[in-house]
């Protein structure tokens, strides 16, 4: 593998595929070296775009309480997640649908989390994905702790914390990055710099030349990557994971991307950002860029588009089926997920709730 991650943090994001689909070899690295993996990444990005759209539809129908759309960020998430082993733990923020789908998480499980059924997101841990973390930044501490545990256990695991540009302003994130560097934890902090933290633009978030530059202060490598270039994201994370696995510690990756839609379904971005800005980023769409590259190198096959679209349609259907009028799980089940061995006080509370539910019929 070429050295994408070097001591000096470059401002220019690493890009292997130009917006028009032409290869832009970087540091001698050629995107055609991953061309056989790109159809799977394309398929995952199309699935993410489709399921994301369906989540918004379901929220508009009143089936979901809230949803944070990820359209535009598919390459960052899919490129990152496909570069890891299925046993590497992911610690998401809340906008990581693409990474969830790469891990084979049922979209219905993600939908139920946003529907607000109390047991909605409990299924992810089977796929080595921690629950969605709405309290911003706390997931980075969990990821570094889990990475340190991996070192102690000697299981060769790498952990990834997903965080946004706004998240990097949280104290927890600074503590996590510092601890990761000091402990040489096998961890990747993957920042999706999507331009905005709700209505706060990135220039109000940091004065460093870039978020990747912050790595210098922590004493770890930092790398900026074009977050709309799935090949570049994949290769940067693959190299960071390889470094972590061989004991060379954490990496801060800043994927420069854009949130095409609103922050969440409760937000109106037209109040704070211009149509021109959105149009500029629309032209950098990660899915069309991947397709253009595959066409350019003669690796495109029309059946891929058909197959990807039909896979996305299947996932959308399964999401709708899971979410429509889904009931909550039995209320008393909530007590089963607190401790491995329930305490007597917890059992007392469970019985009290069960009795009350019984009384109410
Ligand atoms: C600890 C904490 N403080 C504040 C919030 C409220 N909040 C929710 S999303 C958000 C902005 C996050 O922006 P960013 O980290 O850039 O991620 P993005 O939503 O853009 O993907 C804030 C401040 C929160 N969820 N948790």
Image (spheres, helix red, strand yellow):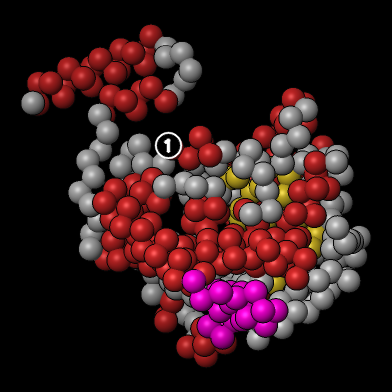
Along the line of sight, the residue nearer the viewer: 336 or 215: 336
Boundaries of the magenta span: 281-303
Give the quarter of the image for residue 117: top left
Along the line of sight, the residue nearer the viewer: 168 or 56: 56
Residue drawn 26% across and 51% down?
321
18 above or below 81?
Answer: below
Magenta segment: does it hold 144? no
262 above or below 44?
Answer: below
Do we see residue 202 in this rendering? no
Do we see residue 296 in this rendering? yes
Q: Quadrant of the N terminus?
A: bottom right
* Left or right side of 81 for 341: left
Query: Could you tell me residue 126's position as x and y percent?
Result: 51, 35
Query: Could you tell me residue 191's position as x and y percent?
Result: 66, 59
34 above or below 145?
Answer: below
Residue topped by disc 1: 122
Query: Could you tell me residue 115's position as x and y percent?
Result: 31, 50
271 above or below 126?
Answer: below
Residue drawn 33% across and 38% down?
118
Give the quarter of the image for residue 57: bottom left
Helix, strand or loop for the magenta stretch, by majority:
helix
Residue drawn 36% across and 23% down?
335
Along the line of sight, the residue nearer the viewer: 198 or 318: 318
* Left or right side of 181 for 45: left
């Amino acid at each position: 593998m070429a050295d994408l991650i070097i001591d000096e943090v470059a401002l220019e994001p690493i890009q292997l595929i130009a917006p028009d689909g032409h290869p832009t070899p970087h540091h001698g690295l050629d995107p055609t070296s991953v061309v056989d993996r790109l159809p799977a990444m394309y398929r995952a990005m199309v699935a993410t775009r489709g399921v994301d759209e369906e989540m918004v539809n379901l929220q508009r129908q009143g089936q979901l309480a809230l949803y944070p759309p990820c359209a535009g960020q598919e390459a960052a998430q899919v490129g990152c997640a496909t570069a890891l082993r299925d046993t590497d733990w992911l610690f998401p923020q809340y906008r990581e649908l693409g990474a969830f789908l790469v891990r084979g998480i049922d979209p219905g499980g993600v939908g139920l989390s946003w529907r607000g059924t109390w047991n909605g997101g409990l299924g992810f841990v089977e796929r080595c994905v921690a629950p969605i973390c709405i309290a911003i930044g706390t997931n980075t501490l969990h990821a570094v702790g889990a990475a340190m545990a991996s070192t102690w256990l000697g299981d060769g695991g790498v952990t990834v914390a997903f965080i946004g540009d706004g998240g990097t302003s949280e104290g927890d994130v600074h503590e996590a990055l510092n601890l990761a560097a000091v402990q040489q934890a096998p961890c990747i902090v993957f920042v999706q710099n999507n331009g905005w933290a709700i209505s706060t633009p990135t220039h109000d978030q940091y004065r460093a030349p870039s978020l990747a530059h912050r790595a210098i202060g922590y004493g770890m490598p930092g790398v900026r990557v074009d977050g709309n270039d799935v090949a570049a994201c994949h290769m940067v994370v693959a190299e960071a994971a390889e470094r972590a696995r061989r004991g060379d510690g954490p990496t801060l990756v800043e994927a420069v991307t854009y949130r095409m839609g609103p922050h969440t379904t409760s937000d109106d971005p037209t109040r704070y950002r211009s149509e021109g800005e959105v149009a500029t980023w629309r032209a950098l769409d990660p899915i069309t860029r991947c397709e253009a590259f595959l066409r350019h190198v003669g690796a495109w096959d029309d059946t891929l588009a058909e197959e990807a679209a039909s896979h996305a349609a299947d996932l959308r259907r399964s999401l709708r089926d899971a979410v429509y009028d889904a009931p909550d799980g039995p209320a008393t089940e909530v007590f089963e997920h607190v401790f491995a061995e329930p305490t007597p006080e917890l059992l007392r509370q469970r019985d009290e709730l069960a009795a009350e539910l019984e009384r109410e019929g």
